[in-house]
Image (cartoon, rainbow, N blue to C red):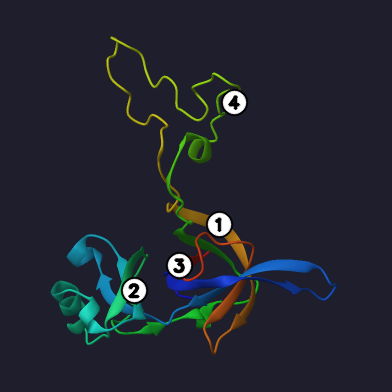
């Protein structure tokens, strides 16, 4: 197994049954194929790392600098690029294609992705605040109330929990077990849920 991670996308969730008949909730992921787009070494860059690319798209969707970076290595136009730190880069070469062929059933992997965005939300939904009284005459049903002191310090402290964008944050789920693999379609089934909606980009790394 290569020591670098892989990129893929979330297909959706379903359930399967084991030999005893127990229901297992699983998430379907399509992993790769990915291309090695750049190799970084301690001598040249100060650290060892591998940059991989995923999802071939039309060249018009990339800017000139992105196209030049990929065309220099004679690679197709790739939508996503991600770097993974490694101990040694001697076994890799630019343009090498990697996918789920090195994963095995029973392996445990860490999966990172962005959870579902909920847009601009208020205090109760975003921070689970308690609402005000709903009786007649109350003017504080779902308002924030006081947000700070008066003359001293005369400002609102940074990080105050207020209304704002909710969700669409980077989430990592650790130690998800691989239940099944379909090598021909680059599909893997992992036990449990994975952050994000269907079609979202995910990155995986084996333990």
Relative to 53, 113 lies left or right: right
Query: Looking at the image, which residue is at 33% across and 71% down?
Result: 80
Badge 2 is on which residue?
52
Tell me how far mark 2 sits from mark 1, CA to CA: 21 Å
Q: Disc 4 on helix, strand or loop?
A: loop
Kindly check if marks 4 and 2 are in contact, taking CB atoms under 8 A apart as contact. Answer: no
Tell me how far mark 3 sits from mark 1, CA to CA: 18 Å
Q: Which of disc 2 and disc 3 is earlier in sequence?
A: 2
The image shows residue 178 at horizontal and vertical percentages of 62, 71
The image shows residue 137 at horizontal and vertical percentages of 54, 18
State whether residue 62 is above or below residue 194.
Answer: below
Q: In this rendering, which labeled residue sits more in front, label 3 or label 2?
A: 3
- Mark 2 surroundings: few (<14), some (14-19) or many (≥20) residues within 10 A: many
- Mark 3 surroundings: few (<14), some (14-19) or many (≥20) residues within 10 A: some
Badge 4 is on which residue?
134
Q: Which of disc 1 and disc 4 is earlier in sequence?
A: 4
Tag on residue 174? Answer: 1
Kindly check if marks 3 and 1 are in contact, taking CB atoms under 8 A apart as contact. Answer: no
State whether residue 13 is above or below residue 58.
Answer: above
Quarter-wise, where is residue 41 in the image?
bottom left
For the residue pair 42 and 96, the one nearer the viewer reads as 96
Q: Which of disc 1 and disc 2 is earlier in sequence?
A: 2
For the residue pair 175 and 207, the one nearer the viewer reads as 175
Query: Looking at the image, which residue is at 19% across and 84% down?
Result: 71
Q: In this rendering, which labeled residue sits more in front, label 3 or label 1?
A: 3
- Mark 1 surroundings: few (<14), some (14-19) or many (≥20) residues within 10 A: some
Q: Residue furthest top?
A: 151
Relative to 54, 131 lies left or right: right
Tell me how far mark 3 sits from mark 2, CA to CA: 17 Å
Q: Which of disc 1 and disc 3 is earlier in sequence?
A: 1
Q: In this rendering, which labeled residue sits more in front, label 4 or label 1?
A: 4
Badge 3 is on which residue?
200
């Amino acid at each position: 197994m290569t020591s670098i991670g892989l990129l893929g996308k979330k297909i959706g969730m379903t359930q399967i049954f084991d030999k005893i008949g127990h229901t297992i909730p699983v998430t379907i992921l399509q992993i790769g194929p990915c291309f090695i787009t750049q190799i970084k070494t301690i001598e040249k860059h100060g650290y060892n790392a591998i940059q991989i690319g995923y999802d071939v798209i039309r060249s018009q969707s990339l800017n000139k600098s992105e196209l030049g970076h990929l065309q220099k290595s004679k690679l197709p136009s790739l939508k996503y690029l991600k770097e993974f730190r490694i101990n040694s880069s001697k076994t890799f070469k630019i343009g090498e294609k990697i996918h789920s062929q090195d994963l095995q059933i029973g392996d445990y992997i860490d999966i990172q992705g962005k959870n579902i965005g909920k847009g601009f939300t208020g205090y109760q939904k975003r921070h689970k605040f308690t609402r005000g009284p709903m009786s007649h005459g109350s003017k504080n049903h779902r308002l924030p109330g006081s947000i700070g002191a008066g003359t001293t310090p005369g400002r609102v402290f940074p990080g105050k929990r207020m209304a704002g964008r909710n969700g669409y944050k980077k989430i990592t789920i650790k130690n998800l077990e691989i239940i099944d693999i379909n090598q021909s379609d680059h599909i893997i089934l992992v036990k449990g849920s994975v952050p994000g909606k269907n079609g979202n980009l995910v990155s995986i790394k084996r333990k």
